Image (cartoon, coloured by chain):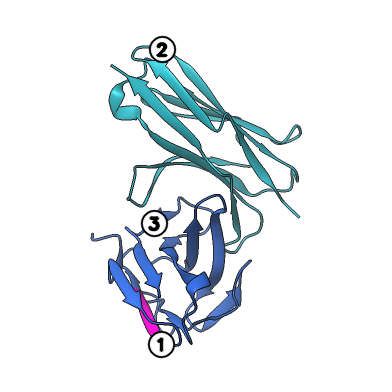
Chain colours: A blue, B cyan
Amino acid sequence: NAGVTQTPKFQVLKTGQSMTLQCAQDMNHEYMSWYRQDPGMGLRLIHYSVGAGITDQGEVPNGYNVSRSTTEDFPLRLLSAAPSQTSVYFCASRGYLSTQYFGPGTRLTVL
Amino acid sequence: KQEVTQIPAALSVPEGENLVLNCSFTDSAIYNLQWFRQDPGKGLTSLLLIQSSQREQTSGRLNASLDKSSGRSTLYIAASQPGDSATYLCAVNINYGQNFVFGPGTRLSVLP
């Protein structure tokens, strides 16, 4: 089992560019989510999904888009990058009421 | 709105000490609570998961307790080691979906 994988590990964007952060899990988990971690702000939920075809907004969804076409994959799209989106992004997955597993993170810098 | 706090923000102890990390949450309507460890520049590693119906969970030198009515959880680390140095975060699951609310973490340093 690879667990939760994320690509890329590092990314530098210019303001206005778009990109997709990839997340995949091989544990057949129904629940997947995206968080961002900022100094002094802790981990905040961006979007989450409770199964293929079902997504919902978390605490800080603005500027991000998600889709869940398969159980395994949950990509996060930045539509038009802004410096405020400079952060470390974590993807996580879990089964129903079970342990949450995190990916290694993507460190994003927006210039 | 659910809020999670952790005390202390940072802790430095000599090797071998037993220590307690605290987590408090404002709304007792939780499904479960999870403790994580995060090493610098790394992702989060799950340590213990306590369901709302449970009072405590143990794994090796770690013991986590949960008191829903008072909105508190503690993580007890026995016989601390330098390898325990990391940031410890607690998170509460506030609905059946993926809505976890995280605390800010406690940064632990165990000195040899």
Magenta portion: prevailing SS class:
strand
Query: On the picture, is B71 further left or further right than A14?
Result: right
Q: Please provide percent x and percent y for residue B103.
A: 58, 45
Residue receiving disc 2: B17
Q: Quadrant of the N terminus of chain B?
A: bottom right
Chain where mark 3 sits: A
Quarter of the image for residue A101 reads bottom left
Residue at (41, 87) in percent of width and height: A18
How far apart, in angstroms, are the residues tagged by discs 3 and 1?
26 Å
Rendered image: mark on residue A102: 3
Specify start and end residues of the magenta stretch as a single range: A17-22
- Which amino acid lies under the numbered mark 3 shown in the image of this protein? Phe
Report the mark closest to the observer, 2 or 3: 2
Which corner quadrant holds the C terminus of chain B?
top left
Picture quadrant where residue A92 is located: bottom left
Q: Position of residue A104 (x, y in %)?
A: 32, 58
> What kind of element bears circle 3?
strand
Label 2 sits on a secondary structure element that is: loop
Q: Which residue is mark 1?
A: A17
